[in-house]
Image (cartoon, coloured by chain):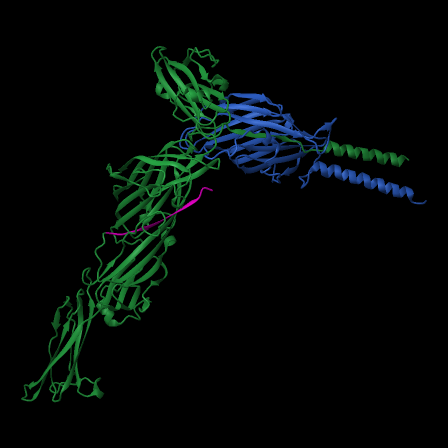
Chain colours: A green, B blue
């Protein structure tokens, strides 16, 4: 089986801002195996897809300070199993919880968007520049996306096979289209995709090439898309093609695919010459194409529908308590104390949200620090709290409201606060439900790459090409028909049968139909190549009045395939055979119908030609009844004779 | 059944098929029904050609090649471990598709027969074309005394998606190989492979047997004669 494995990984992404101090990237990677199994009867590469989507959440500290007590609230949809810690610094403790049981209330209070979270990630410490990665597996089969791909790729060639040794040029059409069926099964509501198609020719066996290529270059790359655009094609030098120099063996083209501009088509010609092929025929690699995408979804940017809901993290913060007193109170006693706290953000690049603070006073006794004193005038506990939601930028500070109370001794005033970095791409945390794009090359497939391996059948055996010319002959007042039969393969052909149909209201003229004399209209050159000719008028398709066939001797290999009927060297070498006749029309006739030709060998350039089907049957005699009857008779006679004796 | 892969079978010797035949399959036989009348030698082949590609195909000239292999005979007695291959004599050959008559020609080669037909009507992309080939070939019948059989090989240089091979007779069906419920065998034959089907009929009202009927019948008769002979001999030798 002609089986080559290609792998692509597609990463969805949107325009990504520069890194945030606490950078949380949810990245879903589509790993699709592209199994190019064949080139079918119509010149189409047969491609099979299997897809596996995995998710990776990278939590990166891009701040200048260490971050502590990081909590990430996640809503993971369409996943199988629990998320796992993929990687982390050795000093960092990372915990993954399902549900809120292990999440402190004040953390939950600071993450108001976490109510629909089904997983919480807790990182105790993350130093500047370090990353914690969490992975999860998307339920591809459950979503029904495991046997498809977000973009369909098809390749079509104008030939299905080429002969060895000869210099061949074949046309390739590479089509990339949005697979809306696949997207409809995902949570990502496809909006648009930036597509980059890069094509490399290759004679490097390690990069989808074959070292037997002696020439390999491309020409005429052109691109078009559904909206009528003609995206620019830029050629460059393929590092994988050492048998061609210059910028004629690779190109790239970029386009934006949308819901209304759903496909991009790139066509190009490949010229190649290959030698030293051992097999009679082989599906042979000659390069690859990579596709890169930036996908924008209208409903979030993950395939699974998973989201980063909220985050909580702290870093350095200064809180200082100010206490003054005692002052003269309303009752004339020196017992009035005033306390407050100043909260300072000392960081260079973080902005905090101070969600709560708490002030309280205790006796000045080391053994009673857990005792909140009561105001001596009101008997109420001396506490003050608030939820100010102060936003403190780098270097900014806020002072709390005053804690005033009556106490005849010297109290201790205490203060604490709850804070977290804000949800902000520049000075806080930011979640990206997508990711950046990795570089793509032929052997680094674990990135946003989609590799299409390109192959073509190389035939070492014979390969028959038939070309028909229909030319008006003013002198003869008739059409000259030349049928040029060439063996462009590497081995001698079997006998060849060539078929032709004469359109209705046409007839062959000016011939004697022996196909041997060269001074009339019907001849075969060389004549010695003709075994026989026959024609029929029965059972012809509509529009045709006569069917003809020529039975030819085997052709020698090595014709150049140009279809010329004046290539005397090839004709004399029996590499080409030219059949000629003249026809003329009467009444209303349609010369266009003359452009039809058939040839019977299995290895022919045209897939639509039929070879002569041979069915075998017959009989095999396996009945030895007469012999057994004879034996029986002899034994019977022996028995009778012996009985008489 | 001497199934399919008898590559050295007799018929392959006559098929000058290219090596490594079809790499790009453009057509196959989606249905091949062959009915052989073991009384008259009448054969009817109903063949459906199928276009596998997206272009019309003119099938052009096709062939049915027939050959018979049999043991050498002295008078009418076949000699075991001998083999003769020869062409099959055919008469009343005709081909048609519906009411359309298809031209056929018969050629007798050295040791095989060629029935050549011509189909000039294109088969549309993915379409089919069904035609029937009929002829009489008494050579296909392997006649005995109380039993007669047909052992028919079938193959082609394209895939036969569904082969239905049926042998009919006014006599009683006594044996088939492969074993079938009735007298019809259904199989799928890959390109360049040959499969054999054997059906045996008897003038005697015997049921269908797991072994060849003539072997069972004549073998039982031989055993009976030998047993009677021995019994009589013992009876004769008993002192009176």
Number of labels in the image equals 0
Q: Quadrant of the N terminus of chain B?
A: top right
- Residue A89 visible, this orientation: yes
B207 or B138: nearer the viewer:
B138
In the image, residue A12 lies in the stretch drawn in magenta: yes
In the figure, residue A546 lies in which quadrant?
top left
In the figure, residue A77 lies in which quadrant?
bottom left
Q: Quadrant of the C terminus of chain B?
A: top right
Residue, x 23% and y 54% (percent of image)? Answer: A16
In the image, residue A28 lies in the stretch drawn in magenta: no
- Magenta region, residue range: A1-14
A311 vs A332, left or right, is right
Residue A553: give x, y in percent of width and height: 50, 22
- Residue A588 visible, this orientation: no
Residue situated furthest right in the rendering: B240
Residue A237: give x, y in percent of width and height: 30, 41
């Amino acid at each position: 089986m002609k089986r080559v494995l290609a792998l692509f990984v597609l990463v969805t992404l949107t325009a990504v801002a520069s890194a945030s101090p606490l950078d949380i990237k949810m990245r879903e990677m589509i790993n699709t195996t592209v199994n190019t199994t064949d080139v079918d009867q119509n010149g189409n590469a047969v491609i099979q897809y299997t897809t596996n989507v995995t998710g990776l959440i990278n939590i990166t500290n891009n701040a200048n300070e260490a971050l502590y007590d990081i909590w990430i609230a996640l809503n993971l949809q369409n996943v199988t199993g629990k998320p796992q810690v993929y990687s982390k610094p050795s000093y960092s403790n990372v915990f993954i919880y399902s549900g809120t049981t292990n999440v402190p209330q004040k953390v939950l209070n600071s993450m108001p968007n976490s109510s629909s979270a089904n997983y919480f990630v807790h990182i105790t410490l993350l130093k500047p520049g370090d990353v914690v990665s969490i992975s999860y597996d998307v339920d591809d089969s459950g979503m029904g996306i495991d046997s498809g791909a977000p973009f369909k790729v098809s390749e079509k060639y104008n030939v299905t096979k080429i002969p060895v040794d000869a210099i061949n040029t074949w046309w390739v059409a590479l089509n990339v289209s949005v697979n809306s069926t696949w997207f409809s099964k995902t949570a990502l509501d496809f909006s648009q995709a930036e597509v980059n198609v890069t094509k490399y020719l290759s004679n490097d066996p390690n990069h989808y090439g074959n070292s037997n290529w002696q020439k390999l270059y491309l020409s005429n790359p052109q691109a078009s898309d559904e909206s009528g655009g003609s995206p620019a094609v830029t050629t460059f030098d393929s590092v994988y093609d050492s048998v061609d120099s210059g910028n004629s063996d690779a190109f790239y083209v970029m386009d934006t695919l949308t819901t209304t501009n759903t496909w991009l088509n790139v066509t190009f010609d490949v010229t190649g010459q290959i030698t030293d092929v051992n097999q009679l025929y082989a599906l042979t690699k000659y390069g690859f194409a990579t596709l890169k995408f930036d996908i924008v979804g209208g409903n979030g940017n993950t395939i699974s529908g998973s989201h980063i809901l909220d985050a909580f993290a702290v870093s350095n913060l200064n809180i200082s308590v100010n206490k003054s007193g005692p002052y003269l109170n309303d009752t004339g006693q020196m017992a009035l104390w005033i306390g407050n706290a100043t909260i300072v953000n000392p960081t260079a690049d973080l902005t905090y949200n101070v969600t709560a603070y708490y002030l309280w006073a205790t006796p000045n006794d080391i053994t009673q620090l857990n005792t909140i004193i009561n105001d001596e005038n009101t008997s109420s506990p001396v506490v003050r709290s608030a939820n100010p939601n102060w936003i403190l930028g780098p270097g900014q500070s806020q002072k709390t409201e005053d804690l005033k109370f009556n106490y005849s001794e010297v109290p201790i005033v205490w203060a604490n606060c709850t804070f977290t970095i804000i949800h902000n791409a520049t000075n806080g945390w930011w979640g990206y439900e997508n990711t950046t794009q990795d570089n793509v090359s032929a052997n680094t497939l674990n990135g946003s790459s989609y590799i299409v391996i390109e192959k073509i059948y190389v035939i070492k055996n014979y390969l028959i090409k038939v070309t028909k010319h229909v030319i008006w002959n003013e002198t003869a007042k008739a059409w000259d028909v030349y049928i040029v039969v060439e063996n462009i393969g590497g081995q001698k052909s079997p006998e060849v049968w060539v078929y032709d149909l004469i359109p209705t209201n046409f007839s062959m003229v000016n011939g004697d139909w022996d196909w041997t004399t060269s001074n009339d209209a019907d001849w075969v050159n060389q004549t010695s190549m003709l075994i026989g000719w026959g024609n029929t008028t029965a059972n012809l398709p509509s529009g045709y009045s006569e069917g003809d066939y020529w039975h030819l001797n085997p052709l020698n290999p090595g014709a150049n395939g140009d279809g010329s009927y004046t290539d005397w060297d090839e004709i004399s070498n029996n590499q080409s055979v030219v059949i000629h006749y003249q026809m003329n029309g009467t009444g209303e006739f349609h010369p266009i119908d003359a452009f039809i030709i058939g040839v019977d060998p299995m290895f022919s350039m045209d897939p639509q030609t039929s070879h002569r089907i041979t069915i075998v049957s017959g009989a095999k005699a396996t009945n030895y009844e007469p012999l057994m009857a004879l034996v029986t008779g002899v034994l019977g006679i022996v028995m009778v004779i012996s009985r008489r004796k | 059944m001497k199934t399919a892969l008898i590559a050295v079978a007799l018929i392959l010797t006559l098929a000058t098929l290219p090596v490594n035949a079809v790499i790009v399959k453009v057509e196959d036989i989606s249905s091949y029904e062959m009915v052989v009348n073991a009384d008259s030698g009448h054969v009817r082949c109903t063949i459906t050609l199928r276009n596998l590609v997206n272009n019309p195909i003119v099938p052009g000239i096709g062939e049915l090649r027939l050959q018979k292999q049999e043991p050498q005979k002295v008078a009418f007695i076949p000699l075991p471990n001998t083999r003769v291959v020869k062409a099959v004599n055919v008469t009343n050959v005709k081909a048609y598709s519906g009411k359309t008559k298809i031209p056929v020609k018969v050629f007798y080669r050295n040791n095989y027969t060629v029935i050549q037909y011509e189909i000039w009507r294109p088969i549309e992309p993915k379409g089919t074309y069904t035609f029937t080939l009929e002829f009489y070939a008494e050579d296909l019948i392997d006649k005995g005394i109380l039993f007669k059989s047909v052992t028919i090989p079938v193959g082609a240089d394209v895939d036969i998606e569904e082969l239905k091979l049926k042998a009919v007779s006014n006599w009683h069906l006594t044996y088939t190989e492969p074993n079938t419920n009735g007298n019809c065998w259904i199989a799928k034959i890959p390109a360049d492979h040959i499969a054999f089907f054997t059906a045996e009929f008897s003038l005697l009202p015997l049921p269908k047997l797991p072994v060849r009927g003539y072997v069972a019948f004549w073998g039982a008769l031989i055993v009976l004669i030998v047993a009677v002979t021995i019994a009589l001999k013992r009876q004769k030798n008993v002192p009176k």
